[in-house]
Image: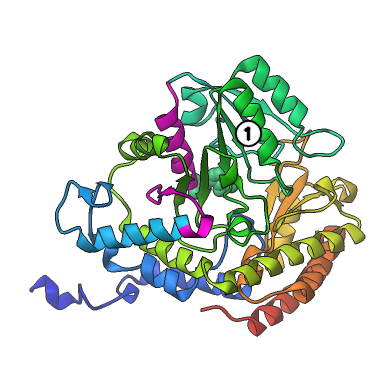
Amino acid sequence: MNWRQGGYFSAGLETDPELFRMIEGELKRQQNGIELIASENLVSRCVLAAQGSIMTNKTVEGTVFKRYYGGAIYADEIEALAISRACKLFNCGFANVQPHSGTNANAGVLLGLLKLGAPILSMNITAGGHISHGHPATLTGRDYTVTHYGVSRRTERVDLDEVRDLALKTRPRLIIAGGSAYPRKLDFSQLRQIADEIGAYLMVDMAHFAGLVAARLYPDPLIYAHVVTTTTYKSLRGARGGMVLWNDPELTQQINQGIFPGVQGSVMLHAIAGKAACLGEALREEFTLYNIEAQRSAVLLAQKLSAGGARIVTGGTDTTLVLVDLTAFDLTGDTAAQALELAGLAVNKNLIPFDQRSPERPSGLRLSTNAGVARGFGEREFATIGGWIIRILHNPSDLGEIENIRNEVSELCAAFPIY
Ligand SMILES: *Cc1c(COP(=O)(O)O)cnc(C)c1O
């Protein structure tokens, strides 16, 4: 039989029933549950189409209009479009949209700007830092000499005096700001001053607040940082992947070569098409409204949880992220997350500053309004969700109560359908 008669170019996922069942299951899970995980979001049908497009067939390497392979006319146009939209959105001179992930963006920048073994200074994980900022289990932890700063015990915010002390003591070549579980504004101007005192680069990883920066609802790191990295699938509400932004033309070659050939080979053009699509959406007025609602809803969710007896780390949030300390409930993050998942509320367990517990059984939960607001929720819905969370935190093993809430969650989801 001719293999083309088997529907190779025409039949879809249904030709693989085993895989089809799993992806359908995940679709139902996303439709019928509330996503509160801060590193997730719900993309538009347009981003989905771009990322699932035939661009996956094309292989290119190198930078736009300087490829090693032919047939790159549309590949070049798409990558150039993503770059120009990124530069316009963040008001910066240069962008590299090739990183397959946030981790690769960070690794590529460090590889491009630093020598092997160079000292770096970044935020520790319990304070909210990210594993790709020099954790010993990662390549960045192996390749550089890493010192971490934390947060103040009293305010749970970055202590700039500590950062300056450690910078003067360890003379890092690069300082990293920004993390995965830090809900507050950062003072980029002060951080840049510290970097300048010792002649270090300042790198800001804005993965969790890039959307707010784009909407001008958070301090702009590009004014102060030498280089800014981000993911595109969290607060930017878009395609899976990462991105690097900067202004100084002197850094262009080092950064681009750090990404390719430094840490990556050929480009994922379907992901870049998805990035172009999400950056196009982010340039529209609607994206500002989305971020205003996400930020407002997060403030309200924090208030609601606090009124219900939970302690909010730092006392609130400036972003769309809320970090909850469960100590008052005599509950660990893993148990709470499991109970919440049974009710259709997806969250992640998280360390809190100065956590005495392990990452597997930490004292906290991390929540975000990003995905909920993408499906149309606002303050009203997040007030309701906050109420459900508190009820479950009080009765994590009451299966009847969880079942009641699960039904209410399904009803709310049905009122805000996705896909
Ligand atoms: C999520 C995140 C990353 C890593 O992104 P991956 O795409 O998972 O590699 C990097 N930095 C920060 C601050 C993040 O929150």
- Pick whichever, 398 or 293, lies toward us: 293
Magenta highlight on residue 106: yes
Instruction: Answer whether residue 290 is visible to the viewer in this image.
Output: yes
Q: In the picture shown, does residue 235 fall above or below 43?
A: above
Q: In the picture shown, does residue 296 fall above or below 100?
A: below
Measured from the top left, where is residue 120 in percent x and y? Answer: 56, 25
Q: In the picture shown, does residue 73 fall above or below 149?
A: below
Q: Which residue is mark 1?
A: 192
Measured from the top left, where is residue 327 in percent x and y? Answer: 86, 45
Point 74% across, 31% down: residue: 160
SS for dot 1: helix
Residue at the farthest left position: 1
- Pick whichever, 3 or 351, lies toward us: 351
Residue at the farthest top position: 169
Measured from the top left, where is residue 367 in percent x and y? Answer: 71, 57
Callout 1: 10 Å neighbours few (<14), some, many (20+)?
many
Position of 364 compared to 118: left or right?
right
Point 51% across, 67% down: residue: 283
Residue at the farthest bottom position: 415
**Span colored in magenta:** 88-115
Amino acid at the residue labelled 1: Arg
Point 70% across, 82% down: residue: 411
- Pick whichever, 384 or 257, lies toward us: 257
Please state, as top left, top right, bottom left or bottom right, where the N terminus lies in the image: bottom left
Disc 1 within 8 angstroms of ligand 1 (CB): no
Position of 4 compared to 21: left or right?
left
Point 46% across, 55% down: residue: 87
